[in-house]
Image: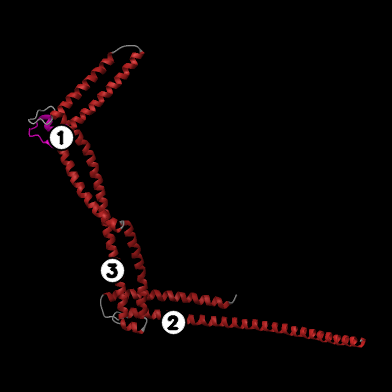
Amino acid sequence: MDERKSIIRELEDKKRADTEARSRLLEGLGETLIQKMEEGGSFSESAGGILAEYRARRNEIAAAADTIKSLEAESLRLKEMEDSISAKEGETSRLTKDFAEACTTLGKALLAVQFSDDFAAAYRQQEDTLLSKIEDQEQKARELEEREGGVLAWLGKNAQMAVSKALVLKNRSALQRVYRSAGEQFFVTKPSDTLEGEAATAAGNAEDIKRRLDSLADDLVILKGERKKITDTFGAEGSPSRRISALQKRMAVVKDEFPGLYLKLGSLATKSEGKEALVSVLNEENRAVLERAAFHQTSIEEREQKIKKVKASISIDNEKAEIEKIKKAIANQRHKIAAANEEISVLEKQIDEAEQNIEGLKAVLEESE
């Protein structure tokens, strides 16, 4: 293997190391200079343009961060609302059952009270009917219980008792619904009579539960309205998680552009016009960085020149080898031409001999005539 290729790889590795070192120096310098330029000063259009690019990206990141905070706050607020709505709906469900039981207790107590407008008269009539049915079915069940007889009679009795008990349960359930309906109607009718005793206690308990239910209903209306506003906003602009993810990705992309801007400004400072443009912010430490960057640049250029020379040397040798190859090809072709010419001479001689034979044969033909 040609050792010069190893030399080229070694030179390219050193050149790459110098290039990376120079870039790091100029990036660091550029970042320092931008921070100083932020504090004020007068700069050339090129330096000011880089600063404007930096500020635009910084502002974009800040705006994205603010938007993310806002979305996170809205998402947290929405979650808190969802939790609150869930809790209040659970409480509403529990209180609704409690209110139904309280209305049932209230209704039963109210049917035992006479009102001036007697709003409960219709319910009282239903109560009497159902109580009568329950009493009849219970009496029938007792009679069946006491009846004696054979196996068939026993089976028939059990079937009838099951029917009676089922009817009792059905009528008791209907009676509870009458009591509950009477209790609920109390809050609609609002009788003017003053309640006392058990009815007053039951009414107070039911009213307390109803107030809590009404308050919960008002709270739920407000919470669901606010939730709808937030979800409508999210629905129009996309889900918070997707928007936050997109903003975070964009922030990462913009942040990755900063090193390029720092290098751009640092590279500007390496040029004579760049130094003049940044003279107001360059100090001795910055100039020392520029000297080290210039040293690396010199090394890069020297290695590039050496690489060119080695490559030129390899190319010259390659061209010489190609020339030798072509020369050999030419010599080979000339040899083939010489051989062909010799073969042609032999063939021409054969033609001459053939033509002489023809002439001799013609003479023989003429003599025979």
Residue at 28% x, 16% y is 145
Q: For numbered disc 2, what is the local secondary structure? A: helix
Q: Position of residue 328 (x, y in %)?
A: 67, 82
Q: What is the distance, in whole Å, between disc 1 and disc 2 at their CAs?
A: 100 Å
Q: Give the mark nearer the N terminus: 3 vs 1.
A: 3
Can you identify the residue that label 2 sits on?
A: 298
Quadrant of the image for the C terminus?
Answer: bottom right
Residue 351 occupies quadrant: bottom right
Q: Give the mark nearer the N terminus: 3 vs 2.
A: 3
Specify whether residue 195 is painted magenta.
Answer: yes
Q: What is the distance, in whole Å, between disc 3 and disc 2 at their CAs?
A: 38 Å
Specify the principal SS of the magenta part.
helix
Q: Position of residue 242 (x, y in %)?
A: 33, 58
In the rendered structure, which amino acid carries the disc numbered 3?
Answer: Asn
Q: Please state the total of marks drawn on the protein image.
A: 3
Q: Choose mark 1 or mark 2, whichever is in front.
A: 1
Specify whether residue 185 is painted magenta.
Answer: yes
Q: Give the mark nearer the N terminus: 1 vs 2.
A: 1
Q: Choose mark 3 or mark 2, whichever is in front.
A: 3
Can you identify the residue that label 1 sits on?
A: 185
Q: Residue furthest right?
A: 368
The stretch of residues the image draws in magenta is 182-204
Can you identify the residue that label 3 sits on?
A: 59
Q: Nearest the camera: 318 or 166?
A: 166
Evaluate if marks 1 and 2 touch, with contact meaning CB atoms under 8 Å apart.
Answer: no
